[in-house]
Image (spheres, rainbow, N blue to C red):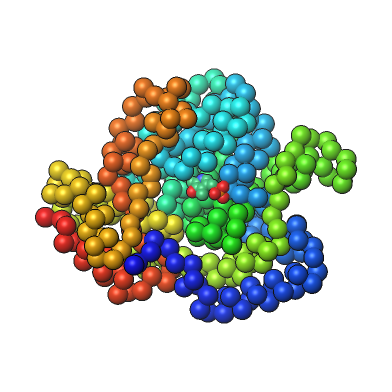
Amino acid sequence: MIPMVDLTAQYDDGLRAEIERGWSEALDQTRFIMGPNVEALESEIADYLGVRHAISCASGTDALELALVAAGVGPGDEVITSPFTFIATAEAICHVGATPVFVDIDPVTFNIDLALAEAAITPRTRAILPVHLFGQPIDATACQALSCHHGLMMIEDCAQSFGARWQGGQTGSFGIAGCFSFFPSKNLGGYGDGGLISTNCPDHAERLRMLRNHGSRERYYHDLLGYNSRLDEIQAIVLRAKLRRIDGYNAGRQAVAAAYADGLGGLPGITVPSVIDGAEHVYHQYTVLIDPAVAGCDRDAVMRALAAAGSASAVYYPVPLHQQTVFAGSHGTQRLPVTETAAAQCLSLPMYPELPQADQQRVIAAVRDCLR
Ligand SMILES: *Cc1c(COP(=O)(O)O)cnc(C)c1O
């Protein structure tokens, strides 16, 4: 079976030996939480992203929540965000007591439509929280300009976009904060949970360093109401080894995407990802739309055909956030047509840097066979 992701394929080029060496040293040193590898990882990621500060934490979800708290977002505030994302984006907004305001997405990028975001601004809006979904950056210059013009903070959800660039700048370097996830299947993934916040603002960085560690600067002196949200050495060792290889991994994803586009682009009823001018897409997911009226078959038929050909496929995401039960009371009657169509038609194909060419062709052939 061709899986969506195969993490064992990365062990081949010495990665596993490098990690095992690092882990063995960590076992001797026993500084398991926020030790030397965590410190080194933070400065290496800050360099990579071209930002002044990188503060690690326990997950991407925590990165979002900590960034919101550090920015002073709380009860009574509204945060404009995407309905077409993983639940964590909106969960974080709710956990700090603020209200997520969902605006419809752009049909090409799946990222929020900035004209609709602007129209949704009210006197209560404090922040805009775009998601660089599937690894395609939003137009970050336009988003910055919008935030600046209306006095909003821009907080980027970069959980799927490590290494993606907008006009040469890394995602996570445009807003007051960029929130990353190191969940194993993400572009830069650990072997457990982990996250990180990037920022150029020294005050924000200082608050984040305190917040992730029980609100303290000095042990047993607590100035803020904080959290236990720290990264451990075991993860930092994995992440440092993979960070050295991240551009190669992302290039591998781009090559798979190019093969898919070659094999599937232009066929009736299927829309393959297109990259907007100025963006570098890192294909956390390769997500197509299947329009049943034109394709002659629906998404489920394509999924069945892929399964019969020995390939996985997945739907990210089947239910938009404004229609999730948890939000039904507050957003149940809202209509977001582009998002709802995307949720009904989207299909993600197997995607990882080492996906063999023969498997790519098997996926392409199975999808082609379904379409008219
Ligand atoms: C994975 C993900 C998160 C949450 O990250 P965790 O590390 O799993 O907590 C948040 N937002 C998006 C868009 C994600 O894909």
Image coordinates of residue 358 in percent, x first then y, are 30, 75
Residue 244 sits above or below residue 68 on the image: below
Image coordinates of residue 258 in percent, x first then y, are 32, 65
Left or right of 360? Residue 94 is: right
Residue 364 appears in view: no
Work out whether residue 19 or residue 105 is closer to the camera in this orientation and state it: 19
Residue 289 appears in view: yes
Work out whether residue 212 or residue 5 is closer to the camera in this orientation and state it: 5
Based on the displayed image, in which of its 4 quarters is residue 32 positioned?
Answer: bottom right
Image coordinates of residue 87 in percent, x first then y, are 48, 40
Work out whether residue 16 or residue 90 is closer to the camera in this orientation and state it: 16
Residue drawn 58% across the image and 44% down it: 61
Count the numbered circles shown: 0
Residue drawn 48% across the image and 35% down it: 81
Left or right of 237? Residue 220 is: right
Based on the displayed image, in which of its 4 quarters is residue 84 positioned?
Answer: top left
Residue drawn 72% across the image and 74% down it: 24
Residue 164 sits above or below residue 259 on the image: above
Residue 121 sits above or below residue 281 on the image: above
Position of the C terminus, as image quadrant, is bottom left
Residue drawn 56% across the image and 52% down it: 181
Left or right of 314? Residue 218 is: right
Position of the N terminus, as image quadrant, is bottom left
